[in-house]
Image (spheres, helix red, strand yellow):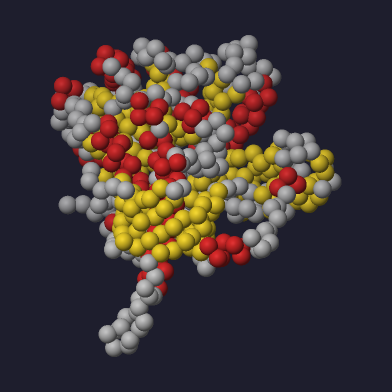
Amino acid sequence: SCMSTLVISVILPLQVHVKMADEAVCVGPAPTSKSYLNMDAIMEVIKKTRAQAVHPGYGFLSENKEFARRLASEGVTFIGPDTHAIQAMGDKIESKLLAKNAKVNTIPGFDGVFELLSNCSPLLGYPVMIKASAGGGGKGMRIAWDDEETREGFRFSSQEAASSFGDDRLLIEKFIDNPRHIEIQVLADKHGNALWLNERECSIQRRNQKVVEEAPSTFLDPETRRAMGEQAVALAKAVKYSSAGTVEFLVDSSKNFYFLEMNTRLQVEHPVTECITGLDLVQEMIRVAKGYPLRHKQADIPINGWAVECRVYAEDPYKSFGLPSIGKLSQYQEPLHVPSVRVDSGIQQGSDISIYYDPMISKLITYGSNRAEALKRMEEALDNYVIRGVAHNISLLREVIVHPRFVQGDISTKFLPEVYPDGFKGHKLTDLERRELLATAASLYVAEQLRSQRFLGTARIPVAKSKRSSWELSVRLGDGIYPVAVSKDGSSFSVEVDGMKLNVTSEWNLASPLLSVTVDGTQRTIQRLSRNASGDTNIQFLGTVYKLQILTKVAAELSKYMPEKAAEDTSSILRSPMPGAVVAVSVKPGDTVSEGQEICVIEAMKMQNSMIAAKTGKVKAVHCKAGDTVGEGDLLVELE
């Protein structure tokens, strides 16, 4: 038997993983540099608890060669590759040279550390990709299409790299436009054996970070899969790799593939590989670290069924496909009642989402005998996922997995900007779906009215029963106002919308966060998120939250006389679009700024974001300074 010890920061004492561990030890305050990246504090815990082995997880020190070296010097097993492999593959510059020597296809680029030049186009030609040499997870990466963007990308990438990895070195290479991002899972032991465990399709991304992954890929044929797998294993053997690792490739439309990087750790998306192969990768990592040889041969590795993973983030998808959101999870319920669903999370109801760490809430995984089945289960799981208290990206995830292009497998790393060129706006209702939503909302309103007329103890206290059986309502949805007539028909409601009658049935358990409603035979799982006395209600329908106002016919007539609040002029003010920390302020009162000029830089979840002026004008007031912590909507700068 063995005991598990977990290291945590001061703000994570109530998370799920803390409760699951046998013991948890605090290693410092919330900032990662003082806790999860504080090697001295972590080594002290290891000595104090007499730990024999350390699994580093997904991030922080998981690919830090110095940490692995210090563990080895203390006689503690690092559950991962040795320091040589971490250094070789963790440094993107060195790994690219090693890949070339191992006959692995590589992207054309500058072989060495990238120093900022006045002009990059003579070297490679634009566009180019600037990357943190020690980086991963999309941090420290920028695409540049000209000299100006190269200079700006160099500045932000080097700052993010230093903040996230303690290493500001950058590399630059030719940017392959519109590729797929497909990675190969490898597993190797200390006896010279290595396997490739098929591929994962990771092309749905925002800001170079994965959002939806699946295994296998719809794009690869057996020959390409084998070629990629064999090159991945060749690279692993070239550096004497031993553990689970991932070799990432970019694949163009002609199925040419190019080495991107190797992650010398367990990947966030590893569950989809476990689903289709039946292997427990963490168990295999522990066995390899103990010195056991692999139990499987390449011919033993199957592709059984299909698995899809959605990364559920505490983000507002309507802002740049996802700007971070913070707060307390006031209500949280995972869709574990849906068949073939797995949820990997470290939070629970009451947990806080902070500005200090990645905004991921969970990994939602569904499995099916084929892709269509896995996607249908994902759709159902997303509809049944209850997350309250923070913004989340459920609406974006659901729209992606039901989009015709995604269903057909026609995807690339540009999927999101191509499908939503003006940004994500939520689900666009068809006329039928609009009627379903209006009918459902009206039925909910009437069901609540009827519930409010019921009293406990009516056997002892005579109450006059209401004989009302029909209601005339006015429902506002978006820019439209719709007359809706509702009549009670037993346990169902008959609702007339647009001159058409719809039958709406449900158990109408209004205390439940999830409501299963059937409209003319079509079952929908909805969530009513809020309501107030003014008739305003927010309903999550087909993944997207819709704002409605439901009034009686009389109240709707009277509402015309209510004054409307004037909208704020946002062109003269700059508010923070997300919670975070102010890294730099570039202006002071009295300065003249041009439209598009950088005003300040906000860092949230280790990503730096440039805030720009919406118009040309003079700075009236600056309400923040470097080092300040700001919330979403906080006033940063005013213009005259």
Residue drawn at (62%, 45%) of the image:
602
Residue 443 placement, left or right of 155: left
The residue closer to the viewer here, 310 or 49, is: 310
Residue 112 in sight from this viewpoint: no
Residue farthest front in this picture: 499
Residue 554 shows in this picture: yes
**Image-quadrant location for residue 561:** bottom right
Judged left or right of residue 38, residue 347 is: left
Q: Which of the pair 589/24 is nearer the observer?
A: 589
Q: Depth check: 370 or 164 in front?
A: 370
**Tally of marks:** 0
Tell me the residue at 18%/26% (across/down). 301
Q: Residue furthest right?
A: 590
Q: Position of residue 293 (x, y in %)?
A: 17, 30
Describe residue 519's horizontal placement relative to residue 177 as left or right: left
Quarter-of-image position of residue 157: top right
Q: Residue 279 vs residue 389: left or right? A: left
What residue is drawn where x is 46% and y is 47%?
A: 498
Position in image of residue 64 (x %, y %): 42, 37
Please state the horizontal and vertical placement of residue 226, each as a whole percent of the image: 26, 17
Above or below: residue 610 compared with residue 505: above
